[in-house]
Image (tube, grey):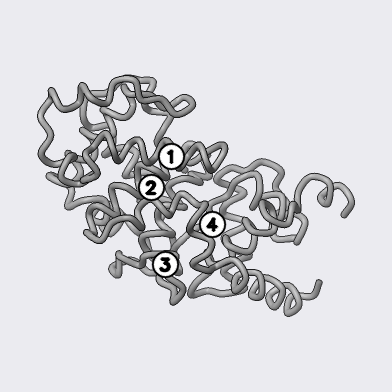
Amino acid sequence: MSGDELKDFLEAKVIQYNTIGFIETDPISLPHRYTLKEDIEVAGFLVASIAWGNRKMILTSGHRMMEMMSDSPYDFIMNHEDYHLDKLAGFVHRTFNSVDFIHFIKALQHIYIHKQGLEGVFDLYQTNESLQPAIHQLYKVFFETPHCQRTVKHISDPFKGSAAKKINMFLRWMIRKDNTGVDFGLWSSISPSKLSCPLDVHSGNVARILGLLTRKQNDARALLELDANLRLLDPKDPVKYDFALFGLGVFEKWGAKELYQN
């Protein structure tokens, strides 16, 4: 495709997949249960943090998380006593277990008390071009409180080479504002132009098929390349193309077969 043809194609796919119907089977449906800004943030951050693998399983585990916090995630974060954390025993989602869950509760409380919340961290450390340095700072802040080493793997750091897919997805939810009722657009202090695509196996394979990505690994360097190409297509809202790349990969089954045929 020419540049204009590619843009037109992706714009059409954004319209197709950036719809309210997208929500039902997606992890973003969980924070959509809430109206309080902080509940949306906490629920969104927690479900994004376990968002790998089967989407039905992600939603099942996310709903269990909320139930364990009495369906009031921000209030639980801020006002829990140590004995309340006993009810989290037994939680497991793949490699994320109750030890990790408890540290996430304590770290989020620390962030809301001392760092002006999740938005405050990203607002403070954003640069003119990117939120990746702010993700690195979140990683540092998240482990200022005592923690088990096993939990460190559940927060990505782009400065260590990670594409930080789950945090970039969460940031899309919080910052990007659309008229379809999918992304929340709660954080008006940060421009959507700084968002990065949540790069995973689906979006990465489709991006390579379309010539938007040449690097084979789905890492921080690949994300930088993909971001640069998506920002050429739309400098103000580059991450909207996540809907197109994800939809083509998951729903239209673009992937390894097409990749090797092109």
Say whether marks 2 and 1 touch (CB < 8 Å).
yes
* Horizontal side of residue 55 vs 68, given as left or right: right
Mark 3 closeness class: few <14, some 14–19, many ≥20 residues within 10 Å = many
Q: Amino acid at mark 3?
A: Arg
Q: Earlier in the sequence, mark 2 or mark 1?
A: 2
| C-alpha gap between disc 1 and disc 3 | 22 Å
Of the pair 219 and 259, the residue shown nearer to us: 259
| C-alpha gap between disc 4 and disc 3 | 12 Å
Of the pair 102 and 188, the residue shown nearer to us: 102
Give the answer, above or below, for where 161 lies relative to 130: above
Q: Amino acid at mark 4?
A: Cys
| C-alpha gap between disc 1 and disc 4 | 15 Å
Q: Earlier in the sequence, mark 1 or mark 3?
A: 1
- The residue wearing badge 3 is 176
| C-alpha gap between disc 2 and disc 1 | 7 Å
| C-alpha gap between disc 2 and disc 3 | 17 Å
Give the answer, above or below, for where 166 lies relative to 123: above
Q: Which of the labelled discs sits on residue 205, or is there none?
A: none
- The residue wearing badge 4 is 197
- The residue wearing badge 2 is 135
User: What residue is drawn where x is 34% and y is 20%?
Assistant: 90
Q: Amino acid at mark 2?
A: Ile
Mark 2 closeness class: few <14, some 14–19, many ≥20 residues within 10 Å = many
- The residue wearing badge 1 is 157
Residue occupying the far right of the picture: 261
Say whether marks 1 and 4 touch (CB < 8 Å).
no
Q: Earlier in the sequence, mark 4 or mark 3?
A: 3
